[in-house]
Image: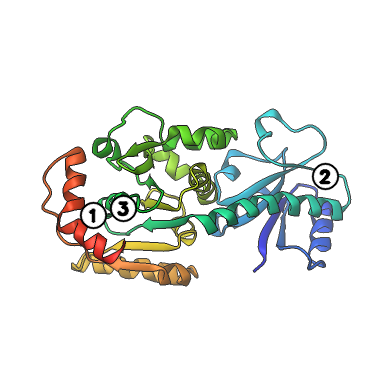
Amino acid sequence: MKRILAVYDTDTAYGDRLTSYLNTRTSHPFQMVAFTSRQALVSYLDKRHVDVLLISQNVISEEILRKDIGQIMLLTEGDVLKELSRYPAIYKYQSSDSVIREVVQAYGSQEEISCAVCRSTERIAVYSPLGRCMKTSLSLVLGEMLSREKKTVYCSLDAFSGLSSILGGEGEEDLSDALYFFRQGDLQSKIHSMLRTHHSLDYLASARCPEDLHQVSAGDLNAVLDLLEQSGAYQCSVIDVGGFVTDVAHILECCSRIYMPVKEDTVSLAKLREYERYMLQAGKEEVMLRTEKLKLPYSHCFGGGEVYLDQLVWGEFGDYVRSRLC
């Protein structure tokens, strides 16, 4: 399937020329769409994911940076602005063949890293459109159990996850810091030192500012998870996916297994039907096929902090997870 390459430059003739050239060639992985106005580009990005955005550094904006874009590359006429130096830069005034070759090379190096991660790390998501369904408890117990057999890392993408109260470590570096370092281009060298360990499970503390989850694109969030998995050559990662994430479906697409705790009351069933209808309309049938719905046993745990998690692991809840998921 062709990847989407969007080009945004106010020079109409340049965009038309590049589009015409690219769409007559078949030896590349892209389908190209060109834009000459910010409004048209933003409207397009509101509706779908773009794999690569090739954009003039003179028209880039925070609004565009927050959209669901896999990789941003700059069209430059000379020097790159210091604040944009983390993005690959491509000189505008060269042949169309040279421009596309540089795009393919830059994108290809990123693809190689991502594919390697997909082959070596099994990413497991726990997600539900329902509330109060033991989603976070399931993700923690699953991560704890998997870590005894495989090298496993845990990350919560939930707002107000309660992770610091359950596992400790409040006030240390967390996902909010990781997102900041990612934007600065420094995350790869820092992320492993940001991790903590509970028993045999490594984890990145959840974001202290929920707005950070809402403002980051799904593409950037997946890139952060890739770096997290690479940092320790992990065999498994368990991701607790919450509703504050901008594009949940795109996050789930990158997971090999998805567990969805469900309930059977009238309101919960109605919410599930709406979720499934949306996923079908959005063309996410593959995500639904990889999703296993779970009716979890009621937990009788009353302890706080680590006591709560230990009670889950060694009680009826843990027996259920061991027998069904591990």
- Find disc 2 in the rendering and name its residue: 92
- Find disc 3 in the rendering and name its residue: 139
Residue depicted at x 88% and y 47%: 94
Q: Quadrant of the C terminus?
A: bottom left
> Is 318 displayed left or right of 288 in the figure?
left
From the viewer's side, name the closer residue of 198 and 268: 198
Q: Residue furthest right?
A: 95
Residue depicted at x 20% and y 38%: 305
Residue 134: mark: 1
Please say whether residue 316 is visible from this viewpoint. yes
Whole-Å distance between the Cαs marked 1 and 2? 52 Å
- Image coordinates of residue 197 in percent, x first then y, are 35, 38
CB-based contact (under 8 Å), mark 2 and mark 3: no
Kind of residue indicated by mark 3? Ser
The disc, 1 or 2, on the residue closer to the chain's N-terminal end is 2
Front label number (2 vs 3): 3
Kind of residue indicated by mark 2? Lys
Please say which color scheme the image uses: rainbow
Bin the neighbour count of mark 1 within 10 Å (Cα to Cα): few under 14, some 14-19, many 20 and up.
some
Question: Which secondary structure, mark 2?
Answer: loop
